[in-house]
Image (cartoon, rainbow, N blue to C red):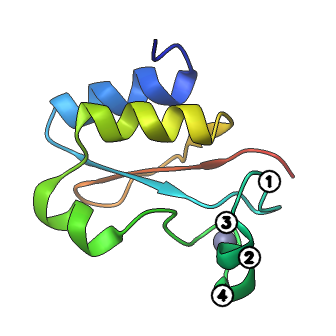
Amino acid sequence: MNDTPFADAALRYAESGLTVLPLCPPDHAGCSTSHRGRCTKPGKVPLVNWSRIREVGASQDAIGRWARRWRDLEPLPGACGQLALFAGDRR
Ligand SMILES: [Zn+2]
């Protein structure tokens, strides 16, 4: 079911205690119109409710949903602190 590179990596990170956070892709492929309208830093803005994820972490269900919705998410090198960051890799 979670057969994207993002899902595999994200589940591993989540199991090891890192907080997984998907960021919008630089070209906003697959992003909602409302995100496009309010986003001022393409490629660097969380696609999900970040304050909630910070509190409770990303569940396996959530990671599965994100993997289906944004199929091009790739791990960003150099996760910061307890964060594992993912973003779309299209340029
Ligand atoms: Zn954005």
Give the Cα separation between the discs numbered 4 and 1: 15 Å
- For the point 77% across and 62% down, the residue is 28
Amino acid identity at mark 1: Ala
Sequence-wise, which precedes: disc 2 or disc 1? 1
Sequence-wise, which precedes: disc 3 or disc 4? 4
> Where on the picture, by quarter, is residue 63?
top left
Residue 39 image offset from top left, x and y in percent: 66, 82
Amino acid identity at mark 4: Arg
Residue 66 image offset from top left, x and y in percent: 48, 41
* Pointers 2 and 3 in contact (C-beta within 8 Å): no
| Residue named by callout 2 | 36
Amino acid identity at mark 3: Gly
* Pointers 2 and 4 in contact (C-beta within 8 Å): yes
> Where on the picture, by quarter, is residue 62?
top left
Sequence-wise, which precedes: disc 1 or disc 3? 1
- Which mark, by number, is residue 43? 3
Give the Cα separation between the discs numbered 2 and 4: 6 Å
Q: Secondary structure at mark 2?
A: helix
Q: Secondary structure at mark 1?
A: loop
Give the Cα separation between the discs numbered 2 and 1: 10 Å
Give the Cα separation between the discs numbered 1 and 3: 10 Å
| Residue named by callout 1 | 29
- Asked if the beta carbon under badge 2 is closer than 8 A to the nearest atom of ligand 1, the reply is yes
- Which mark, by number, is residue 10? none
